Image (cartoon, grey):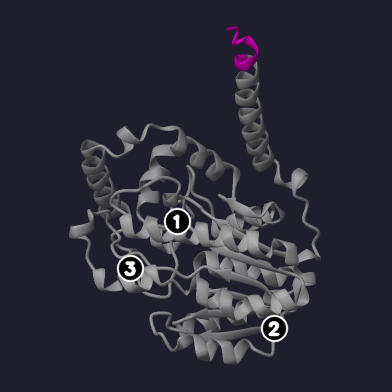
Amino acid sequence: MDYTHFFIFLGSLVVLHYAVKLLGFIRMLCPKFFFPLPKSFLRSMGEWAVVTGGSEGIGRAYAFELASHGMNVIILSRSKDKLERTAKEIEEETGKRVKVLVADFSRDDVYREIEDNLKDLEIGVLVNNVGILPSMIPSKFLETKNLNQVRFILHSPLHSMCRICLPGMEKRGKGVIVNLSSGVATIPCPLYSLYSASKVFVERFSLCLQAEYSAKGIIIQTIAPFSVSTAMIGFQKGGLSILPEDFVRTSLQYLKAGGKINGSVGHTFMGWLLQSLPSGILHSEAMQEGFIAYVKKAVASERHSSVKKPQVGESFVPAANIALNKLTA
């Protein structure tokens, strides 16, 4: 029996599959060309933007950028002083209104208060940025400290904030929800098992919501950055590390792409590289032990004076990105 036509057909499918993946990768390298975003687009979604974890780091950068696009902004965090300082800076620089909501996301009753404060506002953009990491230093599950925080990690504010803001967007037939994940969710990430697993939930939840509500005119996107230069990684620069302001500006260029993105060309390449490496190497005992020692040394030598303990209600990139940053510098 001649199988020539079968193998030609099979080969054509393989070529087509990789051609589509290559085209998708090329699109991620040229966001301005493939996903043009008019300056007025975000403001057209609604009058107000809501940013959780908006007092510093990536959340603060989103608040500034959204205000610069003409939106009034509501920032949430549990630090009143930082919120008020950030709000004042945004108002002075952009001339837009800023509301602050002091919110401790570890409390179950916090969402009723948030909903009461948001119910009469036209929410066009929601940025779910708040998160927590049980242990700054990578560790195996049974050696992880602060396991009492597992409940907060697995019951993220993500779905509660979406439930509050999404109905108004659906009613108006437009809106944007940006959910911050992490590059450590790109592959199974031992030593950050709880954190990386929770970020996989963020990605899957976001992709499901996008499928459910894209027909309603709502963009729901998850962003999985690697190293962003914030206080939690000692404001490192160089390599893959990018300033929060630059990261937010570049990530918004991908907004119309929807789905999952890494937020910048360098982080897109890093995600592709990690997925290409054999898991047997990345997950080996020698690699894990070496990684723990490497991060401990990096934290001790470069961040001892600036590292603060992880706090519920503050977002950051884990210490794994210190190593990623140094390895690519």
Q: Position of residue 30 (x, y in %)?
A: 70, 41
Dot 1 amino acid type: Val
Q: Is-magenta flag for residue 2?
A: yes
Tell me the SS state at disc 2: loop
Task: Pick the quarter of the image with the N terminus.
Answer: top right
Q: Earlier in the sequence, mark 1 or mark 3?
A: 1
What residue is shown with label 2? 97
- First in sequence, mark 2 or 1: give its number: 2
The question of residue 143 being in magenta is answered with no
C-alpha distance separating marks 2 and 3: 31 Å
Indicate the secondary structure of the residue bearing disc 3.
loop
Q: Secondary structure at mark 1?
A: helix
Q: Nearer the viewer, residue 205 or 123?
A: 205
Given residues 166 and 47, the one toward you in this image is 166
- Label 1 CA crowd tier, 10 Å (few <14, some 14–19, many 20+): many
Residue 326, image x and y in percent?
A: 39, 42
Which residue does the image show at 69% across and 90% down from the upper left? Answer: 120
| Label at residue 308 | 3
> Which residue reaches farthest front?
1
Residue stretch rendered in magenta on the structure: 1-7
Give residue 200's mark.
1
Give the answer, above or below, for where 40 lies relative to 261.
Answer: below
Above or below, 253 against 123 in this view is above
Give, as a three-letter code, the residue at label 3.
Answer: Lys
Whole-Å distance between the Cαs marked 2 and 1? 34 Å
Viewer-nearest residue: 110 or 227: 110
Residue 169: name its quadrant. Answer: bottom right
The residue type indicated by label 2 comes to: Arg
Count the numbered circles shown: 3
